[in-house]
Structure formats: structure tokens, C-alpha cells
Image (cartoon, rainbow, N blue to C red):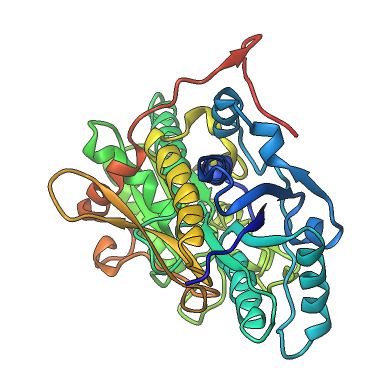
Amino acid sequence: MKELFGNAVVGQSGGPTAAINATLAGVVRGVLENNKKNIAKLYGMRNGMEGLLAEDLIDLSAFFEGSEEKLRLLEQTPAAALGSCRLKLPKPQENPAFFERLVAIFKKYDIRFFFYIGGNDSMDTVAKLTAYLASSDYEMKVMGIPKTIDNDLLGTDHTPGYGSAAKYIAVTMQEILRDCAVYRIPAVTIVELMGRDAGWLTAASAVGRLTGGMEPDYVYLPECAFDLDKFIADVKAALARHPNVVIAVSEGVRFANGRYVGEGSQSGATDKFGHAYLAGVGKVLEYAVRDSIGCKVRSLELSLPQRCAAHLASETDLTESAGVGKAAVLAACEGISGEVMAIDRIPGKTYAVAFAHHPASSVANGVRKVNPEFCTPEGNQVTDSFCRWLLPLIQGERKIVFQNGLPAHLTF
């Protein structure tokens, strides 16, 4: 196989995570350690594909050359340091001129390696670019690198970013539970968590049961059809056991007919990929409890901190996120293209993983649901087997560099 030589470009897309910059650091390390054997220079595209189209690029090789300190600082920086976007690419057969424009930019900057860090929709970009290049005379390697707190990508045991988000949720839920337990007045607290189509994040709220901590009374996931009458019955049963009831619910819970429980509180608007904007299910359930039971009730949204709380990131997550980024560079330099990296859990008593890759076409636009065995038959809690599966992913804490009492962040 003929070895390619040229420049590389990397971008970040979709919703940020506390570990997406660790993956970027891994890509940078992979390129620097390649020592210009295949890749002469690494560009970063600002705001994903939008930045590439605008030729808004930064020379990351020069920025990070010889500075492990900068790379470590990048790893502890939340959000997407290069900026993100939610640009939906057209189908190659419907708009070949769009892809011809991309190839012209690749040729102009001698880009032969393309790395895109993102979730389901970002892998759609990887798949479409790969499909177009198959009929093009311009040779380059295209690799998708997974990222999403939702943990809903196909083909991987878990996604970079999920472990840190799950850790934040588990810790915050412990704190909420203890705060709610100080009074004897009957009260219900409903905590709404992210997760439009999969309940991995919400499920993380229960892991305290295996650590000597506390857990919410009920956990409701999109994978289990939601019944409002049964929900009210659950709340009444919990109030009969103790005065302070705490419930975790995913923003994407649906009724049996497929309608979102929180749909009534939204405008019906969708993003560029056709996904409904969701939020407000906590308020819907708060009003339902108030009207049906009449006790003190409140709802909380953990919202953005779920994906940007880098001060509480999982060391395991950061290490794996950086590792999968570096592995993507190694794979591309070995001739792999059109694939999405994955994390495989190695069977055994001791937690260990290996990096693999799968065709982007088999990953793009799919949704990985919570395993059926991780949900209780009643549909209102998760099982111990889920908690045991999750525990290794939230292990360890990075020693954070502080400046004047606040975590230091890197910016370009």
C-alpha cells in the first residue's frame, strides 16, 4: 500500500464534553510522535466544517510543538477548544459541487488526513465525505473519533465524554439526595437529565447504591414507555416509605404512543438534523405531582454542567479519550480510512480496554439504547448490573492546575 504524505486537519463538532479536548490532545500527540513520517503539519479547523469551508485554520503543530504542558492544560479544559458546529452535509450524489469545494480546500492546504471528533451526526459527515472520496481522484484518509456524553454511538462499549458526565451526575445526585434528606416535611424533588433517545446519563444517577451512598427512588429512561398514572402511583408509594422522594428522569422519556412527555412545553422546533429541542419534562411532572398529590414539589435541571464540569472529570475517561485520539492518527497513517474509532472492553476481572474501528457507514445516524438487562421490569429503575458496568468509567480524578483559585483553561 502506497504511504500518503501531506498535512492533516482536525475538527470538533456537536455538543461539547469535558473530555473532547483530551481527544484533541491525543490527535496532536499522535501527529507530533509521527515525526513528519506521514504528516507534515496538523491544522485545526475552527467551528468544525464551517471553519474548514471558511478556511479558518490554526497551525496546531506549531502551537503545541515541544509543549506537553500545553497539552495537559488542553486536557483539563472543558468544551470544544477549537469551537463546534452542527452543519449537516448534503448527500454527495445530490450536491457534488459542495464536495468539490471541500476537495479544492484539501488540495490548497495539501491535506491528506482528516480527523473529525463528534457524535452521531458528526459521523454522518465522515461517512458522506468517505463516500464522495471513493469516486474522487484525490486520495486522503478520513477518520471519525467518537465523542458524546449521551453514550449512544453504535459499535463501542462506551463513548469518550460519557464517563466524566456520568461521574458529575452521580456526584451531584449524591449531594442532592443528602440535601433533600434533612427535613421531615413530605416533598418530591424531580431531577431532569440530558438524553433525548437514550437514558445512559440518567441511569448514572443510581450508581451510588454500590458505593455506600444513596440513590434516587426512581429512575425513568426513554427506553421504557412512560405512564403518568403509574408515575403518580410510584410517587405515592415512595412517600409512604419516607418523606423525601427524589426522582431522576431523562428529558427524552416518551409515552407509549411515542410522544415526548415534555413535548407540550416546547415549540416543536427541531435542529438541522431533525432532532426535537427537548427540555421541560421536569416541570411537566412537577405540575402533575402538585395537582395529583398536593405535597411540596420542585424540579431541577442539571443542564449544561453535565457536559462541561471538567473540574470533576473522570481520569479514566480523560485517559481513554486521549488514547482514542492518538489511535486514530496511528490507524490513518497505517492506511485505514472511512472508519470510526471505538473502545472495546476486554473481558476479565480487571477493567481494561482496547481501541478498534468500524466503518463510518455502520455507525452514522444510529442510536445505541441502554441494554434491556440494565432496566428493571417495572421500568422505573436500573439494575445492579448497570451500576457495575458503569463504575470503572468514573474512576480517578485528574490533578487540576489552578490559577488564582480557579481551574486554568487553554484557549487558542
Residue occupying the far bottom of the picture: 93
Q: Could you tell whether 389 is left or right of 313 in the image?
A: left
Quadrant of the rendered image containing residue 230: bottom left
Residue occupying the far right of the picture: 54
Residue occupying the far top of the picture: 404
Residue at coordinates 61% horizontally, 83% vertically from top-left? 134
| 283 relative to 29, above or below | below
Asked if one can make out residue 328 in the rendered structure from this viewpoint, the answer is yes
Q: Could you tell whether 158 is left or right of 297 in the image?
A: left
| 377 relative to 282, above or below | below
**Residue 321 or residue 265, whichever sits in front:** 321
| 189 relative to 398, above or below | below
Quadrant of the rendered image containing residue 373: bottom left
The image shows residue 153 at horizontal and vertical percentages of 46, 65
Residue at coordinates 80% horizontally, 78% vertically from top-left? 100
**Residue 412 or residue 216, whichever sits in front:** 412
The image shows residue 303 at horizontal and vertical percentages of 60, 45
Q: Could you tell whether 275 is left or right of 166 in the image?
A: right
Q: Could you tell whether 205 is left or right of 390 in the image?
A: right
The image shows residue 364 at horizontal and vertical percentages of 54, 74
Quarter of the image with the C terminus is: top right
Residue at coordinates 77% horizontally, 77% vertically from top-left? 99
| 100 relative to 16, above or below | below
The image shows residue 321 at horizontal and vertical percentages of 46, 45
